[in-house]
Image (spheres, rainbow, N blue to C red):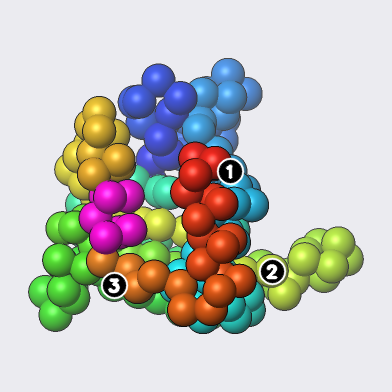
Amino acid sequence: GGMFPAHDGSLVRWESARGSGEERRRVKWGQIKREARAVEKVIRCYGEDVSRLVDVCRQSIVFSSVSELAHCLQLMADDEGVELVRVKNRMSLAEDGAASAGFRNVSVNLRVVEEGARSFGVDTHVCEVQLLLSDFAALQSLTGRHDRYLLHRDYHRPQPRSSMASAAWLVHRVAGS
């Protein structure tokens, strides 16, 4: 079964979190993307088209094996309360590992379309679920690993073209937020 990253760097099995409030509190639940990072991404990656920003809300699920990961993906696909918007398989050998600094996962963009989501008006909101193997999760949590990815990402992404975008990007970088 799937596991969730915990605040202390360990992993919490879903079966444990589901059955225990204490275990559920240990889970490091996904946070909403910071506003400054969302603006930067819209400008630098999506040509100022805000409709392309689909990872404002993101959660990771970690698996011990490829078969467990594939089973979870199949459960998502079969769930009538979920609409899969996009599945990006960064584990595929056809995927250019240089583009992600060697990081591998399956990124699922989805909408929750069940009645409860509709009643709150959030059924059109796209969120991201990252499915990854435990070995990659361990690499991701190494000190400095994420910082190196950010440098790689920022180096390889094109600079903003418009003067407004350039100013917004510069303010974001100088502010360090």
Q: Measuring 30% from the left and 42% from the top, which residue is drawn there?
A: 146
Q: CA distance from mark 1 to mark 3?
A: 23 Å
Which secondary structure lies at badge 1?
A: loop
As drawn, is 112 to the left or to the right of 6? right
- What is the three-letter code of the residue carrying label 2? His
User: Farthest left residue?
Assistant: 93
Marks 1 and 3: which is nearer the front? 1
Q: Is residue 15 visible?
A: yes
Q: Which residue is mark 2?
A: 125
Q: Residue at x 53, y 78 (%)?
A: 162
Residues shaded magenta: 149-155
| Residue at 47%, 49% in the rendered image | 173
Between disc 1 and disc 2, whose residue precedes?
1
Please, what is the three-letter code of the amino acid marked with disc 1?
Gln
Q: Does the image show residue 71? A: no
Q: Position of residue 97 (x, y in %)?
A: 15, 66
Q: Tell me the quarter of the picture where residue 113 sits.
A: bottom right
Percent coordinates x, y for residue 59 in the rendering: 50, 50
- Residue of label 3: 89
Within the magenta stretch, is there residue 151?
yes
Residue 31's disc number: 1
For marks 1 and 2, give the CA distance: 15 Å
Give the camera-side residue of 50 and 140: 50
